[in-house]
Image (spheres, rainbow, N blue to C red):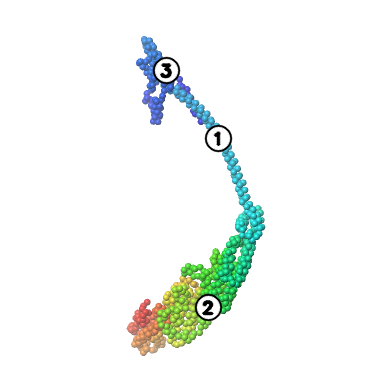
């Protein structure tokens, strides 16, 4: 950019004329041109600079150094410091000696004018010098300005050149970037073409390899790599069917894959046949040991598995991916494998079964030995099959079932014709033991389920022996079920009691302290057998039971672990119904033996119904068993509910509401429970009625006589005037009641204790009996109060006194108030 022009013209020097300067005071100057603080500082600074400014070089030789204008010296006629006065001049025009003596005022004035002009000139000399210096500075600045203009022009020229270069570089850069993008696009297209062409080019390599057949081809490492590449190419073209000729290449790749899988199948089948021939030749030697046989049958096959397992894995993988093309090849491999194994094992299995002598050997031992042997063979075969294959669950189990059929063909007829329940149960126990060994141990408290399906996520993780033994177990369970039903009908439903079976209460009186005798139950009561269905009292107590009850419990205990729950519940319901009917028939027979046998018959029925009810409870849920075994607190609770609520007869299912937490829900078990509870309520009420009727016989006789007299008293004397109705007769009746009531109640309680063998159960029946006696006495007393004069009834016992009397007659521990 340009610099402003510093050229200025020097002002003309005024002539040295004597003019009177215009006078202006400082105050006027300040008023006319006031300065602010900043301007004052600038003036002061400018003054300081001007005072210290050096003289120009042309005045350096002058002696005058004062900055103030010189004044004429008395010794010299020239003003001091004048730059224009020669230093060597002896005189000056202004010196008085240059003028003649002043004679006139005009001459003096002229002289004074000259002096004033000289003084003014001297005073302006510094300004002129400074002005000259400023002119030099202006010239220098003008020269610098011209130089700057030249530099500016050069810089502008350089900027224009730079802009031109920059514009050209930008165009070159854009062109270069465009060329690079084009190059990258072409490279990407080339790489993409090369990448896609690789999938098509693999077909030629795969075809070339498959055109060189031979047994050693499938064993080459490159063979599996070729299969892997063909799979990759096939999958790629499957997802890019829009490529040109993609369908044709897909077909050809499929043909290559099928051909490769066929080569694997052919090699595997050929290897099996060669191995079978070799093993059969060696097994033909009769002196071969069992260890050598096991080595030939299993170790030899295991040794060759390392070569064929990678090939079979590829075959299985392709069979899963392309079942329509490859699954038949895998099936042929399975068939060839099982054919070879069956040909090697069948002869040995038949020989081992003949050694067991299935015709004459004991059934349980035959089952145990035969199933154990077959389990070992099947386990070995399953492990060997897993070594070669990871699929084919159905095929391996069909093959193993075929091996088991050689034993089952002999074992099944023996089971179906076995008449003994215990033997059938033992057979089921043996089979279930083998199946339990095959089942993983469940958490504590969980039951082992025999019919669980194998894990779906890994079907070949381990051999499911239960799958192989299930058919035999079902045969044994079916036979056991039919035989048990037959026994139920013959030994319970149609049971004909023997003379000794109905000897009650004689059978109970022969047992001394049954609660202290050693328990000899048909179901063990040890801690190890705490999961048994029933825990029964001692054998002495069981001997007092009616045979059909013992037989029912025995059969149910046998069937519980060997029959499916649904079937077991049905047969248990049937058994309980038959047992209840047989007990009812036996009770009727006991009642018919003598007139006094009515109470014994009812107590016999109650005793057995209580046991049968606990059987139902044990079948319904996992009941809390005490040390008394089957005699639990549920008996007393049930009796108490039955006798406290008269509505329980109309709604008998109410007593089972506390068992809502049942673990085993019997599908149709309400009928036997309702029937048992109804019988219990009816029989208990009959037992209480027997005691009550006998105890209040005198009172009831008087009430009946009084009722008859009241109906026919027209024209006759009142009851109080009759011989049998006088107040004294009433007191005799009361005394008779007290005497008979005490003996009847004591005898009745003795019978209860003899049959029920449990004070808690007896204590449930006592309060209803006491309440009924007290009620009957109260009714009699109210009748006396209504029919006789005032004060007659006061001679009889009041209700609290009757309660005290009845409780005292009952005795300890049943006489205490509740």
Residue 177 percent location from the top left of the image:
58, 42
Using the image, tell me which numbered label, if any, was put on residue 366: none
| Quarter holding residue 264 | bottom right
Q: Is residue 563 at least partly visible in the picture? A: no
Number of numbered callouts drawn: 3
| Residue at 41% in and 16% down | 86
Q: Name the residue under label 2.
A: 423
Decide: is 84 above or below 161: above
Q: Name the residue under label 3.
A: 84
**SS class of the residue under badge 1?**
helix
Q: Distance between the residues labelled 3 and 1?
A: 59 Å
Answer with mark 2 or mark 1, whichever residue precedes in sequence. 1
Q: Distance between the residues labelled 3 and 2?
A: 165 Å
Q: Name the residue under label 1.
A: 162
Name the residue nearer the viewer: 585 or 143. Answer: 143
Mark 3 or mark 2, whichever is nearer to me? 2
Q: Residues within 10 Å of mark 3 (few under 14, many from 20)?
A: few
| Residue at 51% in and 83% down | 495
């Amino acid at each position: 950019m340009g610099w402003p022009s510093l050229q200025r013209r020097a002002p003309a020097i005024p002539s040295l004329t004597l003019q009177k300067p215009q006078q202006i005071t400082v105050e006027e100057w300040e008023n006319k041109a006031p300065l602010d603080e900043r301007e004052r500082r600038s003036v002061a600074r400018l003054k300081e600079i001007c005072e210290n400014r050096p003289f120009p070089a042309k005045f350096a030789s002058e002696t005058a150094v004062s900055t103030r204008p010189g004044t004429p010296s008395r010794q010299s006629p020239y003003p001091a410091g004048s730059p224009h006065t020669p230093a060597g001049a002896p005189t000056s025009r202004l010196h008085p000696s240059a003028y003649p003596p002043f004679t006139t005022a005009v001459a003096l004035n002229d002289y004074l004018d000259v002096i004033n002009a000289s003084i003014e000139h001297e005073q302006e000399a510094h300004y002129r010098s400074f002005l000259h210096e400023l002119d030099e500075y202006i010239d220098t600045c003008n020269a610098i300005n011209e130089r700057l203009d030249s530099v500016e022009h050069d810089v502008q020229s350089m900027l224009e050149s730079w802009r031109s270069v920059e514009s050209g570089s930008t165009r070159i850069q854009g062109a270069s970037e465009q060329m690079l993008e084009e190059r990258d696009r072409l490279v990407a297209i080339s790489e993409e073409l090369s990448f896609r062409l690789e999938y098509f080019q693999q077909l030629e390599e795969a075809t070339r390899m498959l055109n060189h057949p031979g047994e050693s081809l499938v064993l080459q490492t490159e063979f599996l790599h070729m299969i892997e590449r063909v799979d990759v190419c096939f999958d790629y073209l499957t997802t890019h069917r829009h490529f040109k000729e993609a369908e044709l290449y897909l077909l050809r790749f499929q043909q290559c894959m099928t051909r490769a899988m066929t080569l694997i199948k052919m090699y595997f089948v050929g290897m099996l046949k060669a191995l079978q021939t070799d093993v059969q030749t060696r097994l033909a030697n009769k002196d071969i040991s069992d260890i050598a046989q096991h080595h030939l049958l299993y170790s030899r096959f295991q040794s060759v598995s390392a070569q064929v397992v990678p090939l079979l894995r590829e075959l299985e993988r392709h069979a899963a991916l392309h079942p329509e093309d490859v699954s038949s090849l895998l099936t042929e491999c399975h068939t060839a494998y099982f054919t070879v194994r069956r040909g090697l094992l069948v002869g040995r299995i038949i020989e081992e079964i003949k050694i067991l002598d299935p015709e004459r050997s004991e059934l349980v031992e035959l089952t145990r030995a035969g199933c154990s042997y077959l389990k070992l063979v099947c386990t070995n075969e399953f492990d060997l099959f897993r070594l070669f294959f990871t699929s084919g669950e159905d095929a391996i189990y069909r093959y193993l079932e075929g091996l088991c059929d050689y034993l089952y063909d002999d074992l099944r007829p023996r089971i179906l014709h076995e008449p003994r329940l215990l033997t059938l149960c033992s057979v089921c126990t043996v089979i279930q033991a083998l199946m339990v060994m095959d089942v993983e141990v469940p958490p504590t408290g969980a039951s082992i389920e025999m019919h669980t399906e194998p894990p779906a996520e890994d079907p070949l993780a381990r051999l499911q022996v239960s799958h192989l033994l299930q058919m035999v177990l079902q045969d044994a369970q079916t036979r056991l079920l039919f035989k048990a039903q037959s026994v139920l009908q013959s030994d319970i439903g149609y049971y004909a009691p023997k003379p000794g079976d109905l000897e009650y209460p004689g059978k109970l009186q022969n047992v001394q302290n049954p609660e202290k005798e050693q328990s000899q139950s048909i179901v063990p009561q040890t801690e190890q057998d705490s999961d048994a269905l029933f825990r029964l009292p001692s054998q002495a107590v069981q001997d007092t039971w009616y045979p059909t009850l013992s037989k029912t419990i025995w059969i149910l205990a046998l069937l519980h672990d060997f029959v499916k729950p649904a079937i077991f519940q049905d047969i248990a319901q049937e058994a309980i119904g038959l047992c209840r009917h047989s007990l009812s028939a036996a009770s009727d027979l006991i009642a018919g033996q003598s007139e006094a046998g009515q109470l014994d018959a009812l107590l016999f029925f109650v005793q057995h119904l209580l046991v049968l009810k606990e059987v139902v409870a044990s079948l319904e849920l996992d009941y809390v068993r005490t040390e008394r075994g089957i005699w639990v607190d549920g008996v007393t609770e049930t009796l108490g509910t039955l006798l406290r609520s008269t509505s329980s007869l109309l709604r008998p299912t109410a007593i089972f509401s506390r068992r809502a937490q049942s673990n085993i829900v019997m599908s149709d078990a309400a009928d036997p429970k309702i029937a048992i509870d109804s019988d219990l309520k009816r029989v208990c009420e009959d037992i209480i009625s027997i005691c009550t009727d006998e105890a209040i016989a005198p009172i009831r006789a008087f009430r009946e006589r009084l009722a008859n007299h009241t109906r026919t008293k027209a024209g006759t004397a009142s009851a109080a005037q009759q011989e049998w109705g006088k107040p004294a007769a009433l007191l005799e009746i009361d005394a008779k009641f007290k005497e008979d009531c005490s003996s009847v109640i004591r005898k009745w309680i003795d019978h209860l204790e003899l049959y029920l063998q449990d004070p808690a159960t007896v204590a449930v029946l006592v309060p209803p009996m006491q309440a009924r006696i007290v009620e009957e006495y109260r009714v009699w007393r109210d009748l006396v109060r209504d029919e006789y004069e005032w004060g007659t009834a006061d001679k009889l016992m009041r209700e609290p006194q009757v309660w005290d009397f009845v409780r005292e007659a009952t005795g300890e521990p049943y006489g205490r108030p509740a």
